[in-house]
Image (cartoon, rainbow, N blue to C red):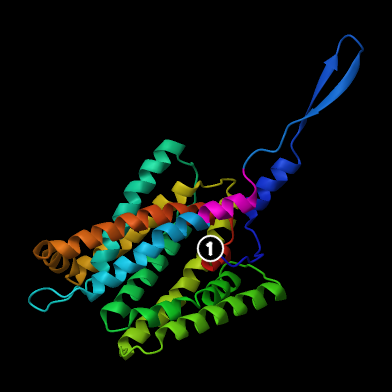
Amino acid sequence: MTSVSCRKSFDTSNDNEESDSMHQHFLHMKSGGSTMAVTEPKAGLPDTAKLLIGAGGIYTAFLYYGSLQEDVFRYVAADGGKFTEAWLLQVLEALANVVIGFLGMQLNGPTKGIPLKMFGISGAAQVSAKACTSLALANGLSFPVATLAKSGKMAPVMAGSLLLGGASYSVREYLQVAAIIGGTAVVSMGKKKGGSQTNSALGVFYIVLSLALDGVTAGFQKKLKVETAKAGVKPKPYDFMFYTNLFMLLTALPIALGTGQLFGGSAYLIANPEIMTKVMKFAACSAFGQSFIFYTISHFDPLVLSTV
């Protein structure tokens, strides 16, 4: 994993400040009448360990997740039909994440007083970005091209954080992001050579729209952290996971229902148990991976997450 010294979120800064300014307990020694200062040791994992935990979980889950996503949209039924119901896929994925997020939130204790408006906006933007990626694949964009396009995700994430989230970055961070995007693009293009797949204009449109929505999501995630700090609350990872996916579900469900994908896609899955198994695994991988995504978001800047 490429190391990028990105700006940490104020949540992490607050943690460090609390640890650094930890109060001292003074014990009065009756025998000598002297006062002895005892400093409490720092609590919690260092940032490097937190990042390794987050990145390890994300890579473990989403390498398989990506493979399953490709399998779902390449699947061809006996009658020649293909699965194209991207919004149904988002409903199932968000539902799995809501369940896991709720259970995790109950185990760790929910955080009270969270401002939900920013969760609603970021959740709607995030599920739309994911749906556009799936729609790009469903409309003929090859998986290698989709992967190449998403490798540049850090650029819109940085732009969204700047324009919507009020973030600021150093020249070094801009150069690091450019180097990572360029290097990933070169590797992806090298792997793509020799391929004969064609890509539709509609598929390209959807992947570009997905990248734009990634930027909007990052901007509002950054703004969300500012709003929670102003409210004096610090959401835990499962708070992020539950509320974000709840609003993702509330966005995807009416769209899937209105477009007919909810019932049409469900019928296709029931008629083709093989792809249904892949979709269930896809949703489970997402829930596992998002546990680590929101763990990372709760401790670091959205740009760090996109770099991972």
**Residue placed at 57% from the left, 64% from the top?**
304
Crowding at mark 1 (Cα within 10 Å: few <14, some 14-19, many 20+) = many
Q: Nearer the viewer, residue 84 or 70?
A: 70
Q: Toward which corner of the image does residue 200 lie, by quadrant? A: bottom left
Relative side of 113 to 139, left or right: right
Relative side of 31 to 136, left or right: right
Vertical placement of 215 versus 46: above or below? below
Provide residue 287's location: percent of width, then percent of height. 36, 54
User: Which image quarter holds the N terminus?
Assistant: bottom right
Secondary element under disc 1, as helix, strand or loop, is helix
Q: Residue furthest top?
A: 31
Asked whether residue 243 appears in the rendered view, the answer is no
Residue placed under numbered mark 1 in the picture: 305
Q: Is residue 5 magenta?
A: no
Provide residue 88's location: percent of width, then percent of height. 23, 65
Provide residue 222's location: percent of width, then percent of height. 56, 62
Magenta range: 45-54
Residue type, label 1:
Leu
Q: How many marks?
A: 1
Relative side of 230 to 67, left or right: right
Relative side of 289 to 44, left or right: left
Q: Toward which corner of the image does residue 159 lie, by quadrant? A: bottom right
**Residue placed at 52% from the left, 84% from the top?**
186
